[in-house]
Image (tube, grey):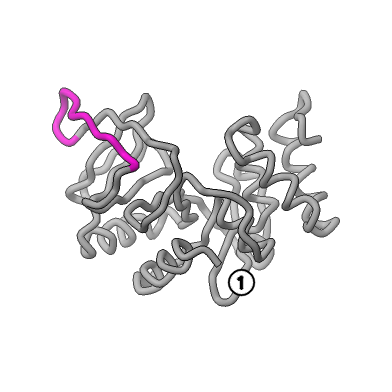
C-alpha cells in the first residue's frame, strides 16, 4: 500500500471527523494494488465538518486555502471568514513544492498554479466536500444522483474510501485527464454488475446526449 496513503490516514484519523479517500487512491484501495503515480491526495469529507477540518489542519501547522475559481485561491486564516464558492480546499506545509502562489490585489487572495509532476511526500492534501441525507451520499453536481452510505463508503484494512462507481462518475467529466481512462479500465474490470449499472445510469442522467464511457 502506498506510503503516502498510509501516512495521510494516520494523520487524519486523529481529527475526529468523517473522511474517505477519493480520486485515484480510492481506485487503488478498491483494487488493493498500486495502479499509477498520483498528482495529489484527494479526500472526500462533508460540508458540515468543513470548519472542524480546517481548524484541525491549522492546529498541525498546515496552511489552508479555498479554491475560488478562475485560478484564484483564498488563504483561510479565520474559519469565520470564508468565501465557500467551491467545494475544494487544499492544505499544505512549508515543505510543499507542488503549489505556486502569487499574491493578488486583494488581501489573502492568490493566483494559484499546481505542478502535476506527482506527489512524493505528505505536504499537500485536498479536501472535496459533499453532502449526505437520510443515510445517502449525494453526488455534488446533482443531488438526485445518490447512493446509500453503506455502498458509497467502503473500507480496506480500516482505511475508508469512496466507492469506485462514485469516483468514476466524478472522473467522467474529464476523461482525457492523465490517468482517468486507466482508472476507469482497471476499476470496471473488477466492479460488480450492480456497481456498473449504478455508474452507467448516473452517467446517463448527467449526460443525456451520450458519453464515451457508455
In the drawing, does residue 139 fall left or right of residue 131?
A: right
Corner quadrant of residue 203? top right
Q: Is residue 160 above or below residue 136?
A: below
Residue 64 x/y as whole percent: 27, 49
Q: Tell me where residue 150 sits by quadrant.
A: bottom right
Q: Position of residue 154 (x, y in %)?
A: 63, 67
Q: In front here: 114 or 213? A: 114
Pick the residue in front: 188 or 198. Answer: 188
The vertical placement of 152 against 171, above or below, is: below
x and y, in percent, of residue 73 in the image? 29, 35
- Residue at the (21%, 32%) spot, across then down: 109
Residue at the right extreme, as displayed? 193
- Return the residue at label 1: 156
Quadrant that contains the N terminus? bottom right
Q: Residue at x 29, y 48 (%)?
A: 96
Q: For residue 9: magenta?
A: no
Image: magenta residue range = 98-108
Residue found farthest to the bottom: 157
Q: Identify which residue is drawn at 28% across, 35% down.
A: 100
- Position of 214 relative to 95 (above/below): above
Percent position (x, y) of residue 151? 69, 64
- Quarter of the picture holding the C terminus: top right
Q: Residue at x 22, y 41 (%)?
A: 75
Q: Is residue 119 above or below residue 7?
A: above
Determine the secondary structure under disc 1.
Answer: strand
Amino acid at each position: 500500500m502506498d506510503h503516502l496513503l498510509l501516512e495521510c490516514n494516520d494523520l487524519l484519523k486523529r481529527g475526529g471527523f468523517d473522511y474517505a479517500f477519493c480520486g485515484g487512491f480510492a481506485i487503488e484501495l478498491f483494487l488493493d494494488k498500486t495502479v499509477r503515480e498520483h498528482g495529489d491526495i484527494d479526500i472526500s469529507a462533508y460540508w458540515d465538518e468543513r470548519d472542524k477540518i480546517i481548524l484541525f489542519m491549522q492546529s498541525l501547522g498546515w496552511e489552508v486555502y479555498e479554491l475560488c475559481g478562475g485560478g484564484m485561491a483564498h488563504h483561510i486564516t479565520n474559519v469565520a471568514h470564508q468565501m465557500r464558492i467551491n467545494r475544494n480546499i487544499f492544505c499544505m506545509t512549508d515543505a510543499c513544492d507542488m503549489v505556486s502562489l502569487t499574491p493578488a490585489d486583494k488581501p489573502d487572495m492568490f493566483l494559484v498554479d499546481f505542478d502535476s509532476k506527482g506527489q512524493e511526500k505528505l505536504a499537500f492534501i485536498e479536501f472535496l466536500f459533499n453532502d449526505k441525507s437520510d443515510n445517502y451520499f449525494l453526488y455534488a453536481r446533482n443531488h438526485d444522483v445518490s447512493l446509500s452510505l453503506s455502498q458509497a463508503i467502503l473500507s480496506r484494512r480500516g482505511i475508508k474510501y469512496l466507492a469506485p462507481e462514485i469516483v468514476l462518475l466524478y472522473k467522467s467529466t474529464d476523461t482525457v485527464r492523465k490517468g482517468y481512462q486507466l482508472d476507469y479500465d482497471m476499476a470496471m474490470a473488477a466492479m460488480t454488475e450492480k456497481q456498473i449499472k449504478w455508474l452507467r445510469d448516473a452517467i446517463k442522467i448527467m449526460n443525456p446526449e451520450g458519453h464515451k464511457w457508455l
